[in-house]
Amino acid sequence: MEVFTKKITLYHQVLKLNAEHKSIGLVPTMGALHAGHLSLIKKSKFENDVTIVSIFVNPTQFNDASDLQKYPRPIQTDMALLKNAGCDILFLPSENEMYSPSEKWDYEVGAIANDLEGVYRPGHFMGVTQIVYKLFTIIPAQKAYFGQKDYQQFLVIKHLVAHFNIPMVLVCCPIVREADGLALSSRNIHLSEPQRKKALLLHKTLSFIKNNYSKLPIDKLLQKVRTDFETEDDVQLEYIAFRDKYTLKPIVTINKAIVLIAAQVGNTRLIDNIMLD
Ligand code: PAF
């Protein structure tokens, strides 16, 4: 695995690979890699000649300084995992490499970014689009891989790509879960053992909805969900939403719906989702 820390060197390497007609898959990450990330790498390796993974904990997408500060950065473990997964190139830039001090980013994502995560993490998607645009410019890959767990992020990045006519295919890969259903997340390491058990309520809720949406009306489903969360201490429901899976607007037909959930478990914020079709 080759490691690049300078954008210009990597850019030239990618141009060289493109000239050699090598297909390139990009997996953008913030590190603290888990099986979810490894599934993206696996898919990219299957579909491309060369897989590039970026690790950069992007400060502009954190609206909470303590969240940024405590974000895990186990770089040695990550590098070992990447080598083992057959990653060809790791891009590991510093903050100075990615940002200049006075820089501004005022791309207006639109309605899709102002809802759900946008409400609870104001400015988050501005930061995501800012860094992803940079990564897509430095690494003109043919495909980029993202996880369904951050489904709203995936749709926001689709908008970005369409807006700037970026010739890249975006691939959304299924959520990877622990055996008991907990969606893998770099933030799970902040959960104590009792909190980890309580965190299962997110997946249990989504499974309950998936199993019952054809039998019960949405208001009844929501009533049960709210009661379940109210009776569980140390867990605060932030939102549970039935949305159109293409637009994230409130649903017209339940068949095209995705259900998205966010909750605070202790001090750890978790998100999850499930498609109803
Ligand atoms: O999903 C993530 O890990 C990040 O939001 C991303 C896409 C790498 C941008 O920093």
Image (cartoon, grey):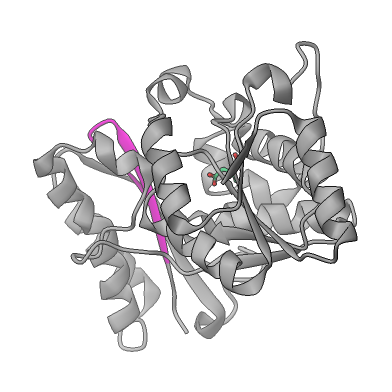
As drawn, 167 above or below 93: below
The answer to whether residue 92 is magenta is: no
* Percent coordinates x, y for residue 171 in the rendering: 63, 67
Q: At 36% from the left edge and 38% from the top edge, which residue is drawn?
A: 77
In this rendered view, identify the residue nearer to me: 33 or 158. 33
Q: Residue furthest bottom?
A: 215
121 to the left or right of 218: right
266 to the left or right of 19: left
The secondary structure that dominates the magenta segment is strand
* Percent coordinates x, y for residue 276 in the rendering: 44, 79
Q: At 52% from the left edge and 85% from the top edge, which residue is drawn?
A: 255
Residue 32 shows up from this direction: no
Q: At 62% from the left edge and 64% from the top edge, which residue is drawn?
A: 249
* Percent coordinates x, y for residue 88 in the rendering: 60, 52
In this rendered view, identify the residue nearer to me: 107 or 183. 183
In this rendered view, identify the residue nearer to me: 164 or 232. 164
Magenta segment boundaries in residue numbering: 262-273
As drawn, 62 above or below 275: above
Q: Choose top left, top right, bottom left or bottom right for residue 99.
A: top right
Q: At 78% from the left edge and 64% from the top edge, which residue is drawn?
A: 22
Answer with the quadrant where ligand 1 appears in the image. Answer: top right
Q: Choose top left, top right, bottom left or bottom right for residue 218.
A: bottom left
Q: Residue furthest top?
A: 101
Residue 66 shows up from this direction: yes
As drawn, 209 above or below 83: below
In this rendered view, identify the residue nearer to me: 49 or 165. 49
The answer to whether residue 266 is magenta is: yes
- Label count reads 0
* Percent coordinates x, y for residue 268 in the rendering: 31, 35
